[in-house]
Image: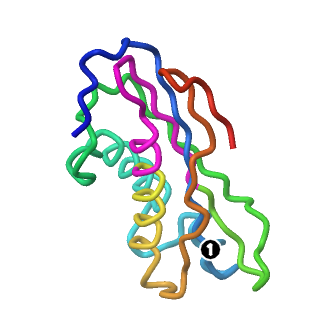
Amino acid sequence: MVDVGDKSVTQRKATAEAVIRMSAATHAAVVAGNVPKGDVLGTARIASIMAAKRTHEAIPMCHPLMIDGVKVEFDTDVAPDADSRPGIAVRVTVKCTGRTGVEMEALHGATVGALTIYDMAKAVEKGMEITAVKLLEKTGGKSGDWKA
């Protein structure tokens, strides 16, 4: 694990997203809340927050961080892919005041949110696909700001 003890404490923020693709029928059921397991997006929001807070337990070299806030947004209007499958983007923003960045927390939160959508809707469709997991931007720290 990298020693961050000599780094300055700064405001840090990172935003990441993951997109999950599915059939139009499954997409409509998720958005309308008509999936047998219940509220898909509400459950995915909670899962994203929990994942961001516990990233250090899943990624071996991540430092445990005192997170100031986690914001989860869903874009249910992601344009269809080449196979005409619409998507839902899970976008997670994590903030903290600390010595190391929160990129991994944002990425972990977005990915687990997409996995939760899959879990909640797999009874309707098993062929969903999680794609485009990426960091969108980060601010703060020694390396400064970065945007995709």
Nearest the camera: 78 or 144? 144
Q: Which residues are magenta?
A: 90-108
Which class describes the residues within 10 Å of circle 1: few (<14), some (14-19), or many (20+)? many
Task: Tell me: residue 71, above or below residue 56.
Answer: above
Colouring scheme applied when the structure was drawn: rainbow
Task: Please identify the quarter of the rendering in which residue 56 is found.
Answer: top left
What residue do we see at 53% from left, 87% from top? 127
Nearest the camera: 22 or 142? 142
Q: Quadrant of the C terminus?
A: top right
Position of residue 10 in the picture relative to residue 139 (left or right) = left
Please say whether residue 105 is one of the residues in the magenta stretch. Answer: yes
Q: Quadrant of the N terminus?
A: top left
Q: Position of residue 8 (x, y in %)?
A: 37, 12
Residue marked by disc 1? 21
Q: Position of residue 78 (x, y in %)?
A: 73, 61
Q: Position of residue 58 (x, y in %)?
A: 24, 54
Task: Tell me: residue 80, above or below residue 148.
Answer: below
Figure label count: 1
Position of residue 21 in the picture relative to residue 59 (left or right) = right
What residue do we see at 57% from left, 54% from top? 134
Position of residue 23 in the picture relative to residue 114 (left or right) = right
Task: Tell me: residue 84, above or below residue 4.
Answer: below
What residue do we see at 62% from left, 78% from top? 22
Q: Amino acid at mark 1?
A: Arg
Q: Position of residue 126 (x, y in %)?
A: 48, 87
Please say whether residue 44 is one of the residues in the magenta stretch. Answer: no
What residue do we see at 25% from left, 46% from top? 61
For label 1, the SS is: strand
